[in-house]
Amino acid sequence: MPERRDLPPSPPGIPVFGNAVQFVRDPFGFVRESARTTGDVFRMRFPGADVYVLAHPDHVETALLDRESFGKLDDFSIAFGDALLAVEGDRWRRQRHAMESFFDPTRIREHADTMVSLAGRRAERWTDGSTVRIDTEMRSLALRNLFEVVLGYAPTADELDELAETAHALNLWFEPTSWVLPAWVPTPARRSFRRGVARMRDHARSLLAEGGDEPEEGSLLAKLATLRDDPDSGVDEAEVLDQVVGMVFAGHETTALSLTFALQLLGANPAVAERVFDELDETLDGPPSAADLEELPVLDRVIHETMRLYPPVHAIPRVTEAPVTLDAHTIPADETVLLSTWCLHRDPREYDDPETFAPRRWASTTPRDRGYSFVPFGGGPRICIGRHLAELELKATLAEVCRRYRIEATGSLDVSPQMTTQPDGPVTIRVTDRRR
Ligand code: HEM
């Protein structure tokens, strides 16, 4: 155990509650202000336990690359069993290797037409001049994409509603009200989570069975079914089911949030939206093809900037496997560490005028140039396996929606950190037909 004076500094708090009151009042504001005034590595004091925050790109790089010292939180394996996002060591290496080819960018590109057509079908239902609740619309669209593209199954509208409810329950393990309690305490949120997992596993089981054990060829489910049937693969049915639940959890809500934020920001920034419309008008003559989607630099910048300002994963959680020294401070073993994407993306040392939505900043720099100061998909070996799929889906959907509609924001965008970055209430935009 390091000496107390070696621990990372902590922002001033109050007796007993430590920093809990400030954190609960304005979590994002408190974390950013603490990084500015207390340092790039700091310790938040909560009644149950301390939580450490890393807010410098070099420290985040260390944490993402040094997997001996920084492991995944137990919560992930308690919640998701043997899913890729939860496992570690050889098991992780084997799974990641087995699934990597499905997520390869050239393979993913083949799904562009499906993504455009799903976005078109969804947008068709909106009436000219109406106000659309985009947070729920985009969640449902992202879930449909996940089922059709990743699992090779097209749910009916009723099935999709039921799946949406089930998928939503998968976030409940990480409900803030459960944070301070040990994993065995059956909070209402955890009970709903377990019911959600059981139902999602049932769906996955029937997909595997209904497809005559041959889900649509080329889907990730087909690949997983093949592995299950190969006695040398070490993959059993239980692992396939965990994998499906984990993909639905990791893949649909994150993508839906980015789509929601991007549409709201376009609606609130008419000059930027106008540039997007001009680019689409110059490039497209009908729904975008996979090749068209590669020729939309203005839209690319809008997407990067949305992911910078509103990263759906606002913090990447890790646990220290051993004491770790950073900036002459030591974090003890077995402590929760948050790699704060939120702080990195809004750091004035890295980005000019960081609170402003300015897609133009990406005209002279790329996500790759930004290194570990831009990590919406994480980094290192455990970087998001679905990032190419998500990026294509964002582009396909935004291009198809903006080809059809002019967008106007009807309110401001306020968000809070839950497991992901969540809007504080319904997000709506007004849409008017651009093609008349
Ligand atoms: C905008 C959308 C998305 C965002 C912002 C996002 C973000 C992330 C981040 C930050 C991580 C790293 C977590 C860590 O290091 O602990 C991650 C991992 C992961 N993501 Fe995504 N993700 C997105 C979309 C998707 C999609 C579409 C899928 C699958 C269909 C997916 C599947 C996964 C999986 C399985 C992992 C775990 C990878 C591993 O541990 O090897 N994600 N994602």
Image: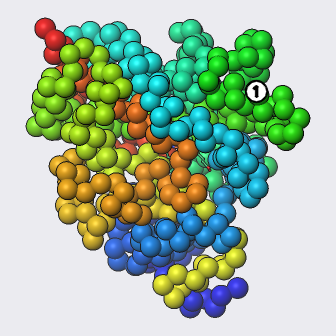
Horizontal placement of 237 versus 279: left or right?
Answer: right
Q: Quadrant of ligand 1?
A: top right
Quarter in which the C terminus is drawn:
top left
Q: Is residue 237 visible?
A: no
> Please, is residue 111 above or below residue 99 in the view?
above
- The foreground one among 153 and 297 is 297
Residue bearing mark 1: 225
How far across and down, in percent of the image, does residue 316 sit? 53, 57
Residue drawn at the location 24% of the way across and 14% of the way down: 286
- Of 242 and 293, which appears nearest the observer? 293
The amino acid type, in three-letter code, at marker 1 is Ala
Outermost residue toward the right in this view: 231
Classify 424 as above or below 395: below
31 or 302, which is in the foreground?
Answer: 302
Q: Residues within 10 Å of mark 1 (few under 14, many from 20)?
A: some
The answer to whether residue 230 is seen in the rendering is yes
Pick the residue in front: 143 or 425: 143
Where disc 1 sits, the SS reads: helix
- Left or right side of 273 for 334: right
Q: Is residue 57 left or right of residue 8?
A: left
